[in-house]
Image (cartoon, rainbow, N blue to C red):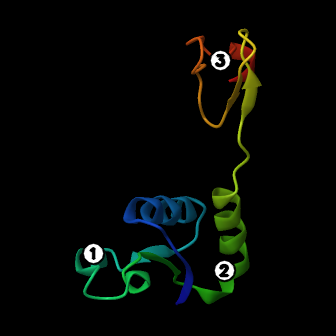
Amino acid sequence: MLRLTQAPNIAIAALWADALQQAGFAATVQRYFLGSVAGQLPPDQCLPEVWLTHDEEESGARALLHALQNMPQRRWLCRCGETVEGGFEQCWNCGAAMPVELG
């Protein structure tokens, strides 16, 4: 078994492990419940970890994990002139919906 990474929280760890599993990698989340002892152990010892069962799959799994962690952000220009970034599908300034051709 090989530790791929620590995750900032259990939700992210579960998402990463699920994405790896969907891609055919045998991945698990370890330290699932250690968040409850934070304060009694050093914080970095309580973070959830994503582990890979088969070491020989490391390069492919790391490539997928890197892609998940560095997804491109969408950016579009609203009709009111405001630039909207990230995953937002509605303008924060005027409330207009993102144009259908960009979705």
Q: Earlier in the sequence, mark 3 or mark 2?
A: 2
| Above-or-below relation of 50 to 79 | below
Q: CA distance from mark 3 to mark 1?
A: 40 Å
Sort mark 3 into few (<14), some (14-19) or many (20+) by Cα contacts within 10 Å.
Answer: some
| Above/below status of 15 relative to 43 | above
Disc 1 packing (10 Å; few <14; some 14–19; many ≥20): few
For disc 1, the marked residue is: 33
CB under 8 Å between discs 3 and 1:
no
Residue 97 at what x, y percent from top left?
60, 14
Alpha carbons under labels 3 and 2: distance apart: 39 Å
Q: Say what amino acid the circle numbered 1 marks.
A: Phe
Which image quadrant for residue 37? bottom left
Q: Which of the marked residues, 1 or 2, is nearer the chain's N terminus?
A: 1
Q: Nearer the viewer, residue 69 or 22?
A: 69
Q: As shown in the figure, which amino acid type bears the numbered disc 3?
A: Met
Lateral position of residue 17 relative to residue 80, left or right: left
Q: Local crowd at mark 2 within 10 Å, few (<14), some, or many (≥20)? A: some
- For mark 1, give the secondary structure: loop
What amino acid is found at the position of numbered circle 2 in the picture?
Glu
- For mark 2, what is the residue? 57
Q: Is residue 41 left or right of residue 55?
A: left
Look at 72% across and 35% down and name the residue there. Answer: 74
Residue 76 falls left or right of residue 90: right
Q: Which residue in the protein does label 3 denote?
A: 98
- Percent x, y for residue 34? 29, 79
Tag 3's secondary structure? loop
